[in-house]
């Protein structure tokens, strides 16, 4: 049995918690560059170890069997999941982690309320309000994240599911939750546990209903937002438990999620509330090109594409989520290797929402051993586009649509795009001319300098690579 | 701690968070998210405290689940981040990726 050494809330424990959150900050700070990020992650993990061990050594902590059970099960699941997960599945994984984090907070809030009731004294408002906040936000993010996970994992349709009267139901739920919170806050001496459970359930429903109608293309915003929510709920739990490391760590996560949410929304030129409540990307919005008419386009085969690429000086590859779906990142890397061996300069232009979560495409390409230096951000690569001989669009659609720039009436007008149409020639590898998530035609496909290569991204890239090798 | 001490800490942490995290490049945003997920696992401390001082069956159950959830966050989060960052770091060698343990608990 471990000897209890720290007084709960005492100076020694608090000092160690301060060390822990300092290490979190140092760890994130080291995460600003790929060469130091791995070390930063270990530093943050060290901070976590200090915080956990300190807590286990608090005076009076008991029930070791249950603690071991929880730690054992959680560790086993965490280890297996982190080893098995494919890089394409990272968004699901992060959604799930957001979910369990939020769930843990909601459960802790519930037990705090029970604890307060069992003491039979007034629960002070500065504890009660954070507990209620933690319960609501934790429950919303648990259920919202689970729905996001199910959508990303294709367990439920990724299309926006509209429930009639959606907004009204959400509003009623929210008002109900607030009313119930007020009811509990007005009876700090004897809060009704049934009302509290009602709050958890209503928040769970709200989490489901808010995320269900959101389409797959908007997942980067949703995941980031849920990340911010779980962070804030942890900070709230810190207020309730008077625990500095919870407050600081939760706030760091909340800031991170908030920054990413704003960046993702900007990258799609939409407000966060528009993403959450507009159900974008469902039925094609009437304005864009009709489906019936076939517009003239140029179609080429792998061999022609290989020739175009092999005799270029600079090639920019524009990957989209389609590349991830087709698992084509390794095949594309082969094409790039062949080109580089012939002296062609190859870059990758990464749109901020190219993937299902912030930075997703970069991880996929890193997995395929693409050097970090070749991954170029949108702002950086766009000015170079006119000097690019061939731009290859693989599995990307809306983020390359020049209509965002040229057509003020387009549903995606104003969305920042990778300006591939500025390149000398464009090759689009795609299965068909079908529209992307925004449900609109991509004008890029019909431009005179664009050649369409209709094929599966992985197969096409493989063919192109072997064609180049034979040239 | 008084409420206002806690609010002070919170406000300062908001500024630190925005300052540090806005410097993380887009390329590393996915590892950043999984790392902050792991840091979020700090809520496991709440679960430990609940179970550690609990004396009724429902709280045992609630707290143990909370610990398990938190441990998934911590161990899974740090380990998968480590795996991802290993991909960014490796350059010369083509394929030899072992998974270092980065978890705590």
Image: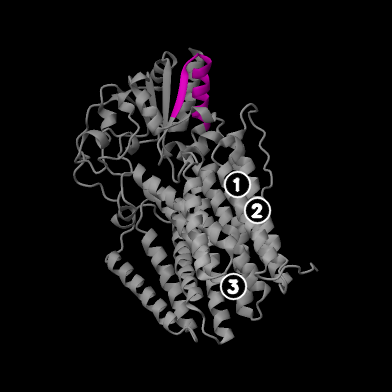
Q: Which mark is residue A153?
A: none
Asked if both marks, 2 and 1, belong to the same chain, the answer given is yes
Chain bearing tag 3 is B
Q: Which mark is residue A47?
A: 2
Q: Secondary structure at mark 2?
A: helix
Reply yes or no: does residue A340 show up in magenta: yes
Q: Quadrant of the N terminus of chain A?
A: bottom right
Q: CA distance from mark 2 to mark 1?
A: 9 Å
- How many labels were placed on the picture? 3
Residue sitting at 50 percent across and 33 percent down?
A: A329
Q: Which mark is residue A27?
A: 1
Find residue A405 and report its image quarter.
top left
**A255, A103: nearer the viewer:** A255
Please provide percent x and percent y for residue B6.
Answer: 52, 65
Q: Is residue B48 above or below residue A458?
A: below
Determine crowd level at label 3: few under 14, some 14-19, many 20+ residues with C-alpha closer than 10 A.
some
Q: Are marks 1 and 3 in contact (CB under 8 Å)?
A: no
Asked if both marks, 1 and 3, belong to the same chain, the answer given is no
Find residue A391 and report its image quarter.
top left
**A446, A271: nearer the viewer:** A271
Q: Is residue A257 above or below residue B52?
A: above
Please provide percent x and percent y for residue A452.
Answer: 33, 27
Asked if both marks, 3 and 2, belong to the same chain, the answer given is no
Q: CA distance from mark 3 to mark 2?
A: 26 Å
Residue sitting at 47 percent across and 77 percent down?
A: A125
Determine crowd level at label 1: few under 14, some 14-19, many 20+ residues with C-alpha closer than 10 A.
many
Reply yes or no: does residue B9 show up in magenta: no
- Frontmost of labels 1 and 3 is 1
Q: Which mark is residue B62?
A: 3
Q: Which residues are magenta?
A: A330-348
Q: Secondary structure at mark 3?
A: helix
Q: Are marks 2 and 1 in contact (CB under 8 Å)?
A: yes
């Amino acid at each position: 049995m471990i000897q209890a050494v720290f007084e709960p809330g005492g100076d020694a424990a608090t000092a160690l918690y301060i060390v822990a959150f300092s290490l979190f900050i140092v760890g994130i700070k080291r995460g600003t560059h790929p060469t130091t990020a791995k070390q930063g992650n270990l530093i943050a993990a060290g901070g976590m170890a200090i915080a956990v061990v300190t807590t286990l050594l608090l005076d009076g902590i008991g029930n070791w069997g249950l603690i071991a059970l929880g730690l054992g099960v959680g560790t086993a699941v965490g280890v297996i999941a982190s080893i098995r997960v494919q890089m394409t599945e990272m968004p699901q994984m992060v959604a799930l982690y957001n979910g369990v984090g939020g769930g843990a907070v909601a459960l802790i809030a519930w037990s705090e309320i029970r604890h307060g009731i069992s003491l039979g004294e007034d629960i002070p408002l500065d504890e009660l309000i954070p507990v209620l906040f933690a319960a609501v936000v934790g429950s919303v993010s648990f259920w919202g994240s689970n729905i996001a996970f199910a959508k990303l994992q294709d367990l439920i349709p990724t299309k926006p599911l509209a429930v009639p009267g959606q907004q009204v139901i959400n509003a009623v739920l929210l008002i109900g939750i607030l009313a119930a919170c007020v009811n509990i806050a007005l009876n700090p001496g004897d809060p009704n546990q049934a009302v509290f459970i009602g709050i958890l359930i209503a928040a769970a429903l709200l989490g489901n209903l808010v995320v269900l109608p959101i389409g797959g293309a908007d997942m980067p915003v949703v995941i980031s937002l849920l990340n911010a929510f779980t962070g804030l709920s942890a900070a709230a739990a810190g207020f309730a438990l008077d625990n500095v490391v919870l407050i600081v760590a939760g706030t760091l996560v909340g800031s991170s999620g908030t920054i990413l949410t704003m960046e993702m929304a900007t990258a799609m030129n939409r407000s966060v509330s528009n993403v959450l409540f507009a159900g974008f990307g469902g039925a094609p919005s009437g304005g864009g090109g009709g489906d019936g008419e076939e517009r003239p386009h140029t179609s080429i085969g792998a061999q022609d594409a290989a020739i175009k690429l092999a005799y270029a000086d600079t090639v920019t590859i524009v990957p989209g989520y389609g590349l991830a779906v087709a698992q084509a990142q390794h095949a594309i890397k082969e094409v790039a290797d062949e080109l580089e061996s012939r002296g062609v300069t190859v870059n990758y232009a990464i749109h901020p929402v190219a993937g299902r979560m912030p930075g997703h495409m970069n991880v996929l390409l890193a997995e395929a051993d693409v050097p970090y230096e070749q991954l170029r951000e949108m702002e950086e690569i766009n000015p170079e586009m006119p000097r690019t001989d061939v731009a290859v669009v693989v599995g990307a659609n809306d983020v390359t649509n020049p209509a965002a720039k040229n057509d003020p009436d387009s549903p995606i007008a104003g969305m920042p795009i990778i300006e591939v149409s500025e390149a000398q020639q464009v090759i689009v590898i795609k299965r068909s001319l079908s529209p992307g998530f925004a449900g609109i035609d991509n004008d890029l496909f019909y431009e005179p300098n664009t050649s369409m290569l209709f094929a599966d991204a992985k197969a096409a890239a493989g063919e192109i690579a072997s064609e180049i090798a034979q040239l | 701690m008084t409420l206002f001490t806690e609010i002070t800490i919170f406000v300062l942490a908001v500024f630190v968070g925005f300052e540090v995290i806005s410097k993380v490049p887009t390329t590393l945003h996915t590892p950043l998210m999984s790392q902050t997920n792991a840091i979020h696992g700090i809520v496991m401390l709440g679960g430990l405290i609940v179970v550690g001082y609990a004396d009724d069956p429902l709280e045992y159950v609630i707290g143990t689940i909370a610990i398990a959830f938190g441990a998934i966050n911590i161990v899974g989060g740090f380990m998968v981040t480590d795996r991802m960052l290993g991909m960014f770091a490796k350059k010369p060698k083509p394929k030899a990726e072992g998974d270092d343990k980065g978890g705590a608990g």
